[in-house]
Amino acid sequence: MPAEWTEDELEMLANATSLEEVGRISVLHLARIATTGSVIQLCGPMTTGGAGNLEANMRRFEQAIYSAAKEGHVTFNQIPIQSAIIRITDHHQTKIYNTDILDVLYAQIFECGHVKTAYFLPDWESSRGACWERERTSALGIDIQECPEHWVV
C-alpha cells in the first residue's frame, strides 16, 4: 500500500486555507514517510492532458501509486491534496491555469529534499504541470524515471 496519510494529516488538509499551508502539510507527511525509505513520487497529467479529464487521470494515478507501493516503493500519495487544491483555488472551475499550484505548493514538495525519484506517467508531455515537474525535478537533481507501463495498465 502507498504510504498512508494519518488522520491528523488528512484533517489538517481538510482545514488548510492556502496552497502554502497544503505544501507545509505535504512536507510534514513526506518527512514522516521518508523515515521508512527513499520516497518516490508519480508525476503526470491531472487536469491538463493525459486521459483527457481529472477523473480518468486520477484513476491512472491511483493505479500507478498502488502498483509502485505494491512493488515496495515508499510512494508519496498526492491524491489527498487534490481536493484541497480544488477547494482553495477553484482551479477546475476556470480556464485559467493557476500556476501557484506549481510555484507555491509543488515547489515546496520537490524542494524539501524528501522526494528522491520522480516517475513520469505516460503522456506526461501533454500536461502543463507535468512539464513543469520534469523541469523542476531535473533542476533539483531528483532522479527522473519513466513510469513502468505495468504500473498504469
Image (spheres, rainbow, N blue to C red):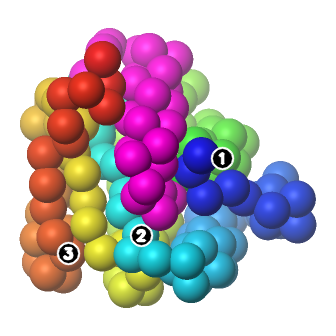
Reply yes or no: does residue 63 show up in magenta. Answer: yes
The x, y position of residue 39, in whole percent, is: 41, 70
- The residue sitting at 72% across, 58% down in the picture is 5
The x, y position of residue 2, in whole percent, is: 57, 50
Structural crowding at the residue carrying mark 2, measured as other residues with C-alpha within 10 Å and reported as few (<14), some (14–19) or many (≥20): many
What residue is disc 2 on?
Answer: 39
Specify whether 56 is left or right of 123: right
The x, y position of residue 33, in whole percent, is: 59, 73
Foreground mark, 2 or 3, reads 2
Query: Mark 1–mark 3 contact, CB under 8 Å?
Result: no
Instruction: Specify start and end residues of the magenta stretch as a single range.
Output: 50-76
Residue type marked 3: Ile
Of callouts 2 and 3, which one flags the residue occurring earlier in the amino acid sequence?
Answer: 2
Of callouts 1 and 3, which one flags the residue occurring earlier in the amino acid sequence?
Answer: 1
Of callouts 2 and 1, which one flags the residue occurring earlier in the amino acid sequence?
Answer: 2
Residue type marked 1: Pro
Secondary structure that dominates the magenta span = helix
Question: Eyeballing the image, is 138 above or below 83?
Answer: below
Structural crowding at the residue carrying mark 1, measured as other residues with C-alpha within 10 Å and reported as few (<14), some (14–19) or many (≥20): some
Q: Is residue 32 visible?
A: yes
Of helix, strand and loop, which one carries label 2?
A: strand
> In front: 101, or 56?
56
- The residue sitting at 46% across, 77% down in the picture is 37
Of helix, strand and loop, which one carries label 1?
A: helix
Reply yes or no: does residue 61 show up in magenta. Answer: yes
Quadrant assignment, res 6: bottom right
Spatial CA span between label 1 and label 3: 23 Å
Which mark identifies residue 80?
A: 1
Spatial CA span between label 2 and label 1: 17 Å
Foreground mark, 2 or 1, reads 2
What residue is disc 3 on?
Answer: 142
